[in-house]
Amino acid sequence: MAAADPATAVSSFSQFSFRRAVCPSPLRVRFSRPHPPARLRVSSTTVVALHKRNPKRLKYAAERQFSRGDAGMLRVEVEPSGEDFWKLDPIIDLINRGAVGVIPTDTVYSIVCDLSNNESIERLRRLKGIGDSKPLSILCRSLRDIDTYTTGFPRGTNQGQANIFRAVKRAIPGPYTFILPASKQFPKQCIKHGSSTRYAKRRQVGVRIPDDPICQAILQNLDEPLICTSVKYLSEDEWILDPVIIADLYEPLGLDFIVDGGPRIADPSTVVDMMGTNPTIIRQGKGPNLDWMVAKDEEEEAQSMFTFKAA
């Protein structure tokens, strides 16, 4: 009997090992290596192979940019300690290519996508089951992002106006969502609200800089902030805190990936409206009420016509 070709055997073993290491699976992915060997670093060509497009699926579901195939969406489990953030490489690549997925924040899990990809934003809305009338927030890398996509925080004046910017700098990164006027750089796709009249009056955006190592590791490797909305049960106004349940519910709907950072606590961000004279809390959450914030009473909160579905 002829001996097997050594090169063929090595190639087959290498491909099998690589697939076992990074191929998406319906099961939760666990990595045994504490540090990434350079030769196994996931490249963009690898991710393309993992998410090979199916022409028939694209024909009948053109809004999907990635097909799950038989293996399912990409699921990566990351330690909160930060020792294995190299596993996020394929997630970064997928986001850059227009994927819609779920990542952890310092509060609850969020569905996210690229800020500048209109098709991804539409898919995110369909996954969450929300219409164009619901505003979306953004996860920012730094205050520079906030200054780019909003008109920024009040800097104070010589007439005695408080320097809110200085106070905010001490509160972030942290569990706060600040509502600010959107700048011209912010995509209209994210803040359209029907008629042009309503749109002109409500050009606002919620901004966040989460204090979460996993979320920050993802953001710092992107060129733009992420559009985000919290993950909830489709039929109930209740957050989903377990990434396994999130995957089970949202994978059949077309979710491309999920970063599993462990279960979270039902404690969303504190939403602070910066559009008025005083920074006003319109939803009390994980972030404490600071001395420069004003609490909104229950009656005003019930009458509010603009509520951000922030994570």
Image (tube, rainbow, N blue to C red):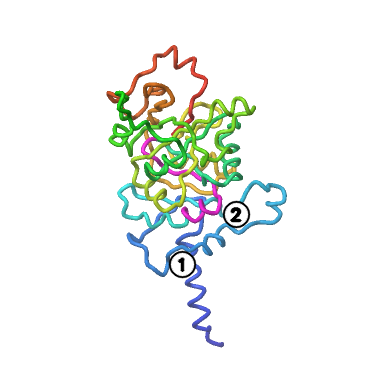
Q: Residue furthest front?
A: 158
- Callout 2 secondary element: loop
Residue type at mark 1? Ser
Q: Is residue 33 left or right of residue 42?
A: left
Q: Is residue 109 left or right of residue 255?
A: left
- Callout 1 secondary element: helix
- Asked whether the viewer can see residue 289, the reply is no
Q: Earlier in the sequence, mark 2 or mark 1?
A: 1
The residue labelled by disc 1 is: 17
Residue type at mark 2? Asp
Residue segment shown in magenta: 91-107
Note whether 193 is above or below 213 in the view shown: above
Note whether 198 is above or below 76 in the view shown: above
The residue labelled by disc 2 is: 70
Where is residue 192 shown, x and y percent of the image?
59, 33
Along the line of sight, the residue nearer the viewer: 84 or 100:
100
Circle 1 crowding by C-alpha within 10 Å: few under 14, some 14–19, many from 20: few
Q: Quadrant of residue 291?
A: top left
Where is residue 45 shown, x and y percent of the image?
53, 64
Note whether 209 is above or below 7 in the view shown: above
Where is residue 178 shown, x and y percent of the image?
41, 31
The residue depicted at 47 percent of the width and 62 percent of the height is 20
